[in-house]
Image (cartoon, helix red, strand yellow):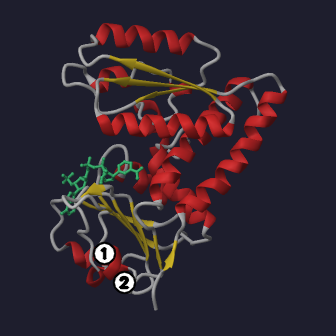
Amino acid sequence: MAARIIDGKLISERVRGKWKERATALKQKGILPGLAVIIVGDDPASKVYVRSKIKICHDVGLHSEVHELPEDTTEEALTDLIKRLNDNPGIHGILLQLPLPAHINKEKVLELIDVNKDVDGHHNYNIGALVTGNTVFPPCTPYGVQCLLKEMDIPTDGQNAVVIGRSNIVGKPMAMLLLQDNATVTICTSRTRDLTQFTLNADILVVATGKAQMVTGDMVKPGATVIDVGINHLPDGRLVGDVDYESVKEVAGYITPVPGGVGPMTITMLVANTVAAAERAAGVA
Ligand code: NDP
């Protein structure tokens, strides 16, 4: 039987509606949640991502502003901007769009963002808080996957979850969130021997490798939930995930499509984190 499709677009609209209500409640108290996005350089994909983030913030009624800095911006100038935004009470969330030009020390500048405004969840403090289970701002993509599972009523408690990929922004925080939700978690990487041995044991399989269509139907346990985080552009212009959708959908119980699965949730969780940051700043429970 073909898998049920997890419609990330539909779910993200529903979830955004809930956060819009919370933003409206804040506005009634005179607080307008605000997001500042910083982009350095001319990476075309980054510009597309930033435009969609700003549009969604606008739709939800948040204040949003973009700070576009040229490719040759110095680390000092970027530092000054981050400090100004940290001190600006009208800005509750700061997102530094990655990648940054090579001459800027990414780790160093990410650490300058006020942890209470780190709505992308990339600051070491927020990563540490995630590990200890005192999550403040989970990174948006794994947070979106967690939200998809909850919205679809897919249980995690006691389930075998396998995450393929160990990046700081997707794989590792994803594993931590699944662990928090009481799954038994395995992380696989490019060094894993016999990947299929692990994937065939997964009730929940999250794939975040950046390798187009690498997980195929014969690697998936019948009835499993397969979450495809990947975004890959094929030479023929098609956009595909890290999962071979056609073969996997014949085996899995649930599957996220690409596009229209995890992607829309990522932006929605940015809205969620920004509104939550404004609530925290206002002392709203
Ligand atoms: P990274 O390149 O930072 O990490 C990829 C990870 O996959 C690494 O840990 C790597 O292992 C592992 N890996 C690569 N090849 C294999 C393999 N053959 N078998 C097992 N593991 C493998 O990527 P990101 O985490 O940043 O992104 C992953 C994907 O998610 C990309 O397609 C990206 O475009 C997409 N993405 C989508 C988002 C969304 O909103 N939908 C947001 C962010 C990312 P090792 O560490 O050993 O090298």
Q: Amino acid at mark 1?
A: Thr
Mark 1 Cα within 10 Å, few/some/many (few <14, many 20+)?
A: many
- Label 2 – label 1 distance at C-alpha: 7 Å
Is residue 181 something one can see in this rendering? no
Residue that numbered label 2 is attached to: 221
Q: Residue at x 41, y 35 (%)?
A: 122
Nearest the viewer among 153 and 2 is 2
Q: Residue at x 28, y 32 (%)?
A: 43
Mark 2 Cα within 10 Å, few/some/many (few <14, many 20+)?
A: many
Q: Residue at x 48, y 73 (%)?
A: 159
Residue 241 in the image: x percent, y percent?
Answer: 32, 62
In the orientation shown, which residue stands out farthest toward the bottom? 1
Label whose residue precedes the other's in the sequence (2 or 1): 1
Count of number-bearing discs: 2
Is residue 101 something one can see in this rendering? yes
Question: Is 240 located above or below residue 23 in the figure?
Answer: below
Specify whether tag 1 is near ligand 1 (CB below 8 Å): no
In which quadrant of the rendered image does the C terminus lie? top right
In the orientation shown, which residue stands out farthest toward the front? 236
Residue that numbered label 1 is attached to: 199
At mark 2, the secondary structure is loop
Q: Left or right of 58: which side holds 3?
A: left
Say which quarter of the image contains residue 160. Answer: bottom left
Q: Amino acid at mark 2?
A: Lys
Q: Contact (CB < 8 A) between labels 2 and 1? A: yes
